[in-house]
Image (cartoon, rainbow, N blue to C red):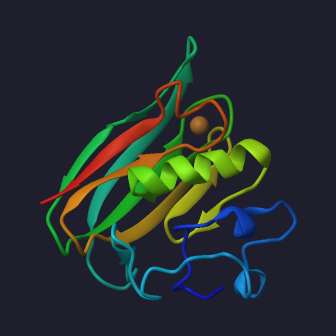
Amino acid sequence: MNRRSFLVGAVAAACLPGAGLSGGALSGSAWAHVGHEEAEFGKPGDPGKPARIVQVVMRDADGRMLYLPNRVVVRRGEQVRFLLRNNGVIDHEFVIGTAEENRRHMKAMEAHPDMEHDDPNAKRLKPGATGEIVWQFTKAGTFEFACLIPGHYQAGMVGIIVVE
Ligand SMILES: [Cu+2]
């Protein structure tokens, strides 16, 4: 897929089940690129370049769902390789975005809970699975990583990324 494409803005059209997340599915959709290059929360990283490693574990137990850690502080311009592991018993996601975008995207997922994310800024992992995201945070601000599967965010599955 087009590596410049990632989940921002009006994602509903791009996330319809069966539509796939290939570049072709995006043309003519309501997909909103932010400057075609970069979102407020950064841009896809370059796996060939050095990156800081941040391990994030997803867990679910006793009605609570969470990330460990749920707060990450990075410097502006820093590239981060998120090593993700789902230690829960159900699927979970890791979606980087602004709080506003994640909220909007969560609404879209309520209508299509089975949409599977595999994008530069988003991964869905089955129980026991691992995955990684390489992302460069290019602007200062406070952003989020969240699980947008219905009910998970509300159960506690959200973390904060502070870019200084
Ligand atoms: Cu989840």
* Residue at image location 51% in from the left, 85% down from the top: 4
Q: Is residue 117 above or below residue 56?
A: below
Residue 106 at x, y percent in the picture = 60, 46
Looking at the image, residue 152 sits to the left or right of residue 145; the answer is right
Q: Is residue 128 above or below residue 130?
A: above
Quarter containing the C terminus: bottom left
- Where ligand 1 lies, by image quadrant? top right
Residue 136 in view: yes
Residue closest to the eye, 147 or 48: 147
Quarter containing the N terminus: bottom right
Residue 68 at x, y percent in the picture = 37, 35
Residue 131 at x, y percent in the picture = 54, 57
> Within the image, what quadrant is residue 141 found in?
bottom left
Q: Is residue 135 above or below residue 160?
A: below
Residue 125 at x, y percent in the picture = 63, 49
Total number of numbered discs in the rendering? 0
